[in-house]
Image: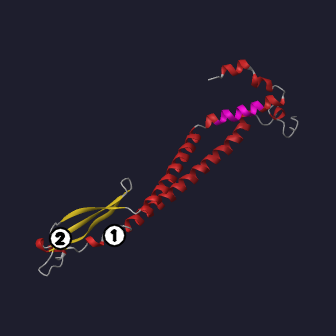
């Protein structure tokens, strides 16, 4: 009949007659480690999703900060044209600018825009505006946060993919503790062994 093992003694736990062996001990630690990694991955992915929403809102805020009202309803009597908002603002964070396309269509005899069916194809002209400094600073801050999250997420995914290495580390530490309990810690300082694993 197997004798109950004493608490806190790896030497007695990891015996031939014990109910728990090295692989099982390793599995306990690896399972906890793996759960923590997957929880961290989920948290990082959620944080990135929330950050992307915030970046989208920042784009909208920056677009609303562009005042192109003076370009609208501008009449060009010589050509019987009037201006209107056609496209944009389109944000270009790299250049720290926004572009707006102002369209032009025909006017009637009174100088007012013709009805939609009479306007013809018309044409557009692109205008560029400088983004506001506070919007640029906010965007940069969010970009930095996104970069940090991406690095952290990549490292977490890499750790999940490299579980065998963590298993070896856990087994090695258990074995090291086992040697220490048996008074064989001097093996860890053996010069020949150290030379074998030297890089």
Local secondary structure at mark 2: strand
Residue depicted at x 53% and y 46%: 151
Is 120 left, or right, of 43 in this rendering?
left
* Residue 126 % position (x, y): 25, 61
Residues at marks 1 and 2, CA–CA distance in whole angstroms: 21 Å
Residue 106 is drawn in which quadrant? Answer: bottom left
| Image: magenta residue range | 166-176
Q: Is residue 105 above or below residue 150?
A: below
- Please tell me whether residue 143 is drawn above or below residue 109 in the rendered image: above
Residue shown at 67% from the left, 40% from the top:
30
Above or below: residue 145 compared with residue 58: above
Please give the name of the residue rendered at 15% of the width and 79% of the height, measured from the top-left corner. Answer: 111
In the foreground, 68 or 195: 68
Instruction: From the image, give the main secondary structure of the stretch colored magenta.
Output: helix
Say if residue 75 shows up in the picture: yes
Q: Is 192 placed above or below 185 here?
A: above
Question: Which residue corresponds to mark 1?
Answer: 67
């Amino acid at each position: 009949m197997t004798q109950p093992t004493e608490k806190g003694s790896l030497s007695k736990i990891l015996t031939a007659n014990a109910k728990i062996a090295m692989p099982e001990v390793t599995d306990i630690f690896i399972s906890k480690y793996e759960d923590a990694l997957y929880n961290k991955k989920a948290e990082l992915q959620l944080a990135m999703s929330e950050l992307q929403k915030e970046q989208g809102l920042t784009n909208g805020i920056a677009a609303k900060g562009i005042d192109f009202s003076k370009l609208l309803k501008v009449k060009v009597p010589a050509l019987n044209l009037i201006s209107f908002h056609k496209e944009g603002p389109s944000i270009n964070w790299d250049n720290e600018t926004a572009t707006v396309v102002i369209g032009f269509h025909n006017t009637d005899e009174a100088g007012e825009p013709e009805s939609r069916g009479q306007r013809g194809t018309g044409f557009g002209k692109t205008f560029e505006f400088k983004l506001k400094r506070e919007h640029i600073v906010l965007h940069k801050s969010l970009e930095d946060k996104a970069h940090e999250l991406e690095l952290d997420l990549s490292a977490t995914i890499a750790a999940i993919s490299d579980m065998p290495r963590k298993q070896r580390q856990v087994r090695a530490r258990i074995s090291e503790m086992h040697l220490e309990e048996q008074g064989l810690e001097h093996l860890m300082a053996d010069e020949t062994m150290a030379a074998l694993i030297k890089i």
